[in-house]
Image (cartoon, rainbow, N blue to C red):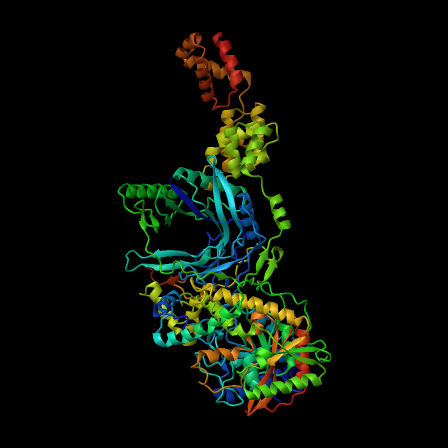
Amino acid sequence: MTKIGLEIHCQLTKLESKLFCSCKADYREFEPNTNVCPICMGIPGSLPLLNKKAVEKATLIAMALDCETPEKIAFFRKNYFYPDLPKNFQITQLNADGYENTSIGWNGKVTVDNKEIQIRRIQLEEDPGRLIYEGATERTKVTLVDYNRAGTPLVEIVTEPDFENPHHVRNFLNILSDLLENLDVSDPGLEGAMRADANVSIEGGSKVEIKNIGSFHDLEKAVHFEITRQQSLAEREIEIIQETRHWDDRRKITVSARTKEEEGEYRYHLEADIPWVNIDSNVKNQLQIQMPENISSKKERYISKYNIAPQVADILASDKYFSDLFENANNETNAKDIANMITTDLMGLVDTREKREQSKLEPTHLTDLIEYIKSNKITRTSAKLALEEVVKTGKSLPQIIEELDLGHVSDESTLSDIISLVLSEETKAVEDAKQNSEIVNFLVGKVMQKTHGKADPELTLTILKKNLGL
Amino acid sequence: MKNLVTEEEITRVAKLMKIELEDHSEHMKRVQKMLEYFDILDNANVESEEIIVQETDLEKLRDDKYVPYDQKLLKFLKTYKGKYVKAPKLS
Amino acid sequence: MDLSISALDYQRGIKNGDFTVEEFISKSLERIESVDKNLHAFLKLNDLALENAKEIDRKIKSNQNVGKCFGMPISVKDNICIAGSITTCGSKALEHFKAPYTATVIDKLNSEDAIIIGKTNLDEFAMGLSTEFSAYGKSKNPWNMDYVPGGSSGGSAVSVSANECIASLGSDTGGSIRNPASFCSVVGLKPTYGLVSRYGLVSYANSIEQIGPLTKTVEDSAFLLNIISGIDPNDNTTIDNDNEDYLSNIDAGIEGKKIGIISEMTNSEGINDEVLNSTNDAIKTFEKLGASCEYVSLQMVRYAVAAYYTITSTEAGSNLARYDNIRYGYEFDTEGFEFNSYISQARNMLGPEVKRRMILGGFVPSAGHAGKYFLKALKVKSKLIKEINLILTGLDFLISPTVPIQPFKFGEKIDDPVSFMLVDFNTVTANLTGKPAISVPYKIVNGLPVGIQIMADSMNEIPLLQAAYALEKTVELPEVPI
């Protein structure tokens, strides 16, 4: 049986500051080496100052993943030399060597596709800096370091090798992304916010680790490739060696990684500059209370309280952006309509993070739109246009309706004139309509076209039918 | 000698710690002597001791606030093009 | 104007108008110029010292608020960061390292209008006990320049002892304040772990080291401790001392106090006769002062040196890993080099003693050996803490000679690593247990100083200083012969 395990690194991007200093947690907008201070640069004599909220958020994650959590947490140094490590050690947590139960969480579980995935442990640690390579040839290549990211808070989540196939893995990552976003601890869509390594073994074979995977999309591919590679080796009765491989994104294969000399001997020891932190049950209870509603219970609530269709509820609950909009826009009576509008008309308008950031839509806009539709002030078709405009400009609905002339044409005489015009133009259809009443809808459509969707559909139908003698 | 530290081990550790040893044997001898002295720890009878550590409470930790560091740290560092730190080539 | 005056006398002198800050600083700089070419206490002097002095005189004259240091010249060990100034830690590896920020203790001194007159010499990265391991040359004992001043804060002790300045800040990891204080006949205090902020102290063994004052008198020690101590948000290992006043009732005496004489540190064969005699004398003095003395045993002391060197080499191996010369250090371009070979070559600038500690620090915590050495050392440390806590429930102080031997000649100890390590025998216990300990100059024998060490329970600096003061008051020592 194929076994796949994951080691996921997730940045706590929702924090204001880094794990051990007050530099910004989100380093992405800074010029190189400008989001740094003596602490995250490891300047001699500097001391790490643990971020309280990082501990709280990480504990929330541990609870959400059903983990056991400790009474005290401790930090350790993982010692090795690498240019992206300002101190040539990483401050991290240890869950071995007699220090079990000092990291943020362990023994958790998540259900994916009806299978329970065990979470071995969760730990809090700092991200290293970033390496950039400049220069075209091997000879002229220069390694440049930007330490803006050094010290960014990371939560490492390690699973047992409980996944059975790449698809399973992908679903888990989606669930995890949604969960982290829902907890308001991280924005998984940010570039580099979530990274994962995998380990793969097939029946009777050794465990192979795969590192250097750029995205979740690549992760699925990498795992798939690795399984295939191992299976083909097994078929030819070649031994699968236990090793670390890198994902080569260009060639879409895994390759054996050159072993780093620094690997394997980290001389872990306690980080004496950070005292052990007591996390008593009061704190944990407080966190439990503050914990946002989880996705599945949100979904249940939407279905049972608002009578929303399960597929629609699923989309709403899994996406924090949508569920926030929904919660703020609905007033019980319009819930279903709001839900539908979000999951049909709105979805396409905000399908990227950029579009969401630029969107000027407020929950009240949705409430107004539904209200206008219900009271016939605007047709559904016009509402779609109005929604697009709202997202773009954020203007009020009345203003948009006026500016774009989206008002309902419900004035009978105006409508009659337009209908007469259509009837005179579409003589064939008029004939056919008398035999086949379905053709009337075609004529309604033509009226809609002429009125740019503003014609009141019911009134149009009534007048048409009258004129056609139906 | 209860604990013979081999040349191999010293070489491995020196590589690990990124230390070049010019006079292997001189260093070996001194390190060996110190390690032999440390053997005295075997007589301490502390197997069952629990390690005492310093503790603090969650409330005492630093608040999560972004405070830009107001100095240009780059001025104090070795820089490349004034922006990056240049590292030696990674093999 | 007498340069041998204490900090408190200096304060009185300035307030009385006996001399100006500028006069005193000027004379101190002359003194340094005259003696330091031989003593080599200083690595660098503060060019702005005289200017700062004039500024403080101006403030005094115009009746502005002046900090309680009143411009007194204080030297600082060169492993404590001062913004904009080169901080070498006695190493060539940091020859061009300019600190971008200032240590908390220096900020505190500056806000009390102290004048930092210069940075003092030390064993490289504070690893040593004779200042012979400085990459910038050795400092000499002003009592006899053929002898070591002790270490690693050798330069600090010399600068105070030779009256080049009023006081100094050093650091103590295994005796590095107390040892040179004892060797140079000055007062040296290692505070309770966590009492003084380490923000800005270049780490050697961060779980046990502290910054502390080296001064001419016990009162001065209390005076400086008042300024530099206190909880610091920049150092999470600091503890709140509720702004205690260490000068309060310093002359309370020790009538009725119970003193334990640590047998392992006093009756051992490693102790030399002059030191033993002086210690017995001190015991009699304590008794005359009204305290009761008895010999006590701390079993774990026997293992303390081994535990100390195991733990410190491990921590040092980690704390010094950052010196790869890539971000800061000294001139040596990375161009053309491969990563591993560059780093090893760059780290050749580390001196031989530091290199040895790096090797030990890689060895003792490594897989396969950690259980035997490092973990065991941590357990010894823990048991020692339990032992000393227990014994201090029935005692007020613990005493011993600060160092089992008197100052030795240059080169004498350097070849035998074990006898070298054992010089720390009496001092490491206070570091491993976090307890405060002070060295009080007690005798000059054959022209060389002997100091007595007093230890107390954690955060008990007030009674500790009272005991030290009481002992000091019974002692009349000759002037330093330089």
Q: Considering depth in this image, is A88 or C147 the residue closer to the camera?
A: C147
Q: Residue furthest left?
A: A236
x then y, percent, for residue B7:
34, 70
Q: Name the image quarter holding residue C323.
A: bottom left
Q: Left of C113 or right of it: where is A347?
A: left
Q: Left of A307 or right of it: where is A209?
A: left
Residue A78, can we see it?
Answer: yes
Residue sitting at x 38%, y 40%? A2
x then y, percent, for residue C214:
58, 79
Residue C334, can we see it?
Answer: no
Residue sitting at x 58%, y 29%? A304
Question: Which quadrant of the rendered structure holds the C terminus of chain C?
Answer: bottom right
Residue A296 vertical position relative to residue A126 in the rendered view, above or below: above
Q: Considering depth in this image, is A135 or C342 the residue closer to the camera?
A: C342
Residue C129 vertical position relative to residue C332 in the rendered view, above or below: below
x then y, percent, for residue C32:
53, 86
Question: Which quadrant of the rendered structure holds the N terminus of chain C?
Answer: bottom right
How many numbered discs sit on the rendered protein?
Answer: 0
Residue sitting at x 55%, y 28%? A308
x then y, percent, for residue A263:
38, 58
